[in-house]
Amino acid sequence: MKKTKSLIKIVEQQKLCITENPYGIERSWPKSYIKNFYDNFCQRLYEYEKSPSILEIDQSNSFNIKLWELFFDSPNIDNFSFEKLMDNVQKNPIKYDLIIINCKNTKINRKTLNEIINLLKSEGTIVLENIGRQTTKLVKIFYFFFKKYNLQIKDYRFRRFILNNCLLIIRKDETKFFQKINNLFFLILFILVEIFLSFYISLIKK
């Protein structure tokens, strides 16, 4: 049976957003992640796996964890610091359906991201949040992982202008040629927006 409730409604009813709760989450506002990505993504995930395994890395806000607990049926949720995860990654037998990384606070390089990808199930997804204003990091990820994985940029700055209001989605699934071209197009668009923002910010600082 298809799930009828949504993340958006849960956030509103439970007052989980920072607009209603001083300790609330920012994924609904000022960021655009709940409405434009997580709501539909979690609906599809629930149809596939009602009790998924979810890993949050360096998640300091407990309401983000509570949101998954309210939406899914007894999900397995881990929340590790980046350092602890890296210390135990070889010993960790758990494979995850969803891994979420806050790029604003977490240092990601080729080696560590490859280890994190190895924690995914075959149909799993990694979400790198707040990737805006991190062009060098994003280009390096595309350079090393583009051929092997499905990398999609979700740039929501045209919908709600927050400088880092962007996601990078990494999936293990096979990517068709035209999807690869489309992914490259959005990478180029992202870079052009970053160049414009850098130029604009330099002007207003003068």
Image: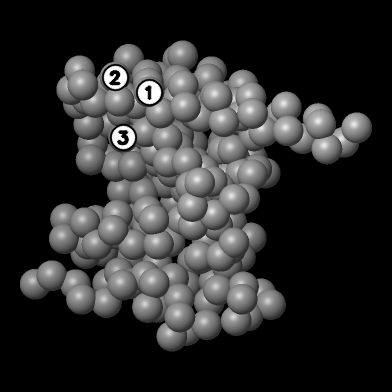
Estimate the spatial distance between the alpha carbons at disc 1 and disc 3, rounded to whole Å: 18 Å
Give the residue at mark 3: 171
Q: Residues within 10 Å of mark 1 (few under 14, many from 20)?
A: some
Q: Quadrant of residue 203?
A: top right
Q: Residues within 10 Å of mark 3 (few under 14, many from 20)?
A: many
Estimate the spatial distance between the alpha carbons at disc 1 and disc 2, rounded to whole Å: 6 Å
**Residue type of the residue flagged with mark 3:** Arg
**Residue type of the residue flagged with mark 1:** Phe
The reply to whether dot 1 and dot 2 touch (C-beta < 8 Å) is yes
Give the residue at mark 1: 185
Viewer-proximal residue among 112 and 85: 112
Q: Secondary structure at mark 1?
A: helix
Which residue sits at x=57%, y=31%?
Answer: 193
* Side (left or right) of 72 relative to 106: left
**Residue type of the residue flagged with mark 2:** Ile
Give the quarter of the figure containing the N terminus: bottom left
Which residue sits at x=19%, y=72%?
Answer: 3
| Residue that lies at the very extreme toward the bottom in this rendered image | 13
Q: Earlier in the sequence, mark 1 or mark 3?
A: 3
